[in-house]
Image (tube, rainbow, N blue to C red):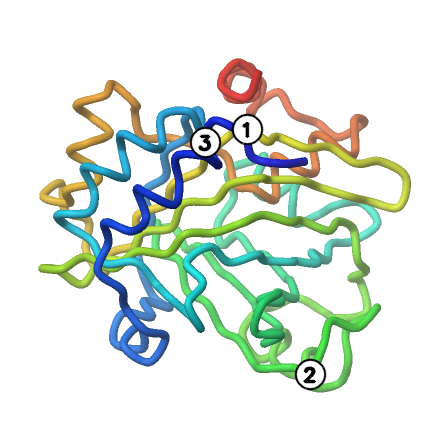
Amino acid sequence: MDTPPEVIAALPATLDGFAPVSLAEMQDVKLLDRLDTKFTFRQDQLPALLREMAAHYRLLEINGARTHRYETLYFDTDGLDLYARHHSGKYSRYKIRYRRYVESGVCFFEVKTKNNKGRTVKHRIERPAIPANLTRDEAALLERETPLKVGAFKPVMWVHFTRLTFVSKTAPERLTLDLDLSYQSESLQAGFPRLAIAEVKQDKLSSASPFVRMMRARRIWQGSMSKYCFGIINLYPHVKMNRFKERMKQLKLVAA
């Protein structure tokens, strides 16, 4: 699935307006322990939004590239127990995944936890590639940082998207914009080429974020569903989704 042509045509000019930030400079704002604020909107709103953002954010640039492709392999149990915890609203919630940065080839195994205070904490180790199953080092990280047992987990879903990563010029804030979202399981696939997902990552929530103000000015209200849960619902139609039904309707309308 590709970004709509009109968005592609507008992206180079709007991205040229951003001062670059290097991967080395990004180390100061890794924010592996953070609070997240999400927004979802149509990609055709991007050009005007990016022009306004350029005064407030720098854009990650690696070897001249400003858009970066991500490949992610998620793990869950046969009964999709991690998804079920999200659906039921239980804490702590976990995501277990490998993520590869396509252009650089760098790959991590990651365990993400969201606690009952809304904080997201991520633990990760670098790996040479994405394997088919969890290995000894991954098992050690999983069992050290969570109460989960590695033997219960298997690959359930691939997720692909293109990301723009921004850093605030004035505050410890990162912002990601994810485009070209697509999913694949063993038997099904789904794509959402017109959907844009924004995530503001802060150490402490602050409504002073320029991007949050831009969203409010456009009447794009805070709220989303995790890419993981959205993908599971689209690839595993038997799962329980009562809690997400209204949000699914909204996302489908935005993505249409």
User: Which numbered disc, 2 or 1, marks the residue that appears first in the sequence?
Assistant: 1
Question: Please, what secondary structure does the residue beneath circle 2 have?
Answer: loop
Q: Residues within 10 Å of mark 2 (few under 14, many from 20)?
A: few
Height in image: 252 above or below 49? above
Residue located at (51% from left, 58% from top): 68
User: Which numbered disc, 3 or 2, marks the residue that appears first in the sequence?
Assistant: 3
Question: Please, what secondary structure does the residue beneath circle 3 have?
Answer: helix
Q: Residues within 10 Å of mark 1 (few under 14, many from 20)?
A: some
Height in image: 59 above or below 8? below
Between 228 and 198, the one lying in front of the other is 198
Residue kind at label 2, given as amino acid type: Pro
Report the number of discs: 3
Instruction: From the top left corner, tell me how far across and down residue 58 is, in percent.
Output: 23, 58
Q: Which residue is mark 3?
A: 7
Height in image: 75 above or below 109? above
Disc 2 or disc 1, which is closer to the eye? 1
CA–CA distance in space, label 2 to label 1: 33 Å
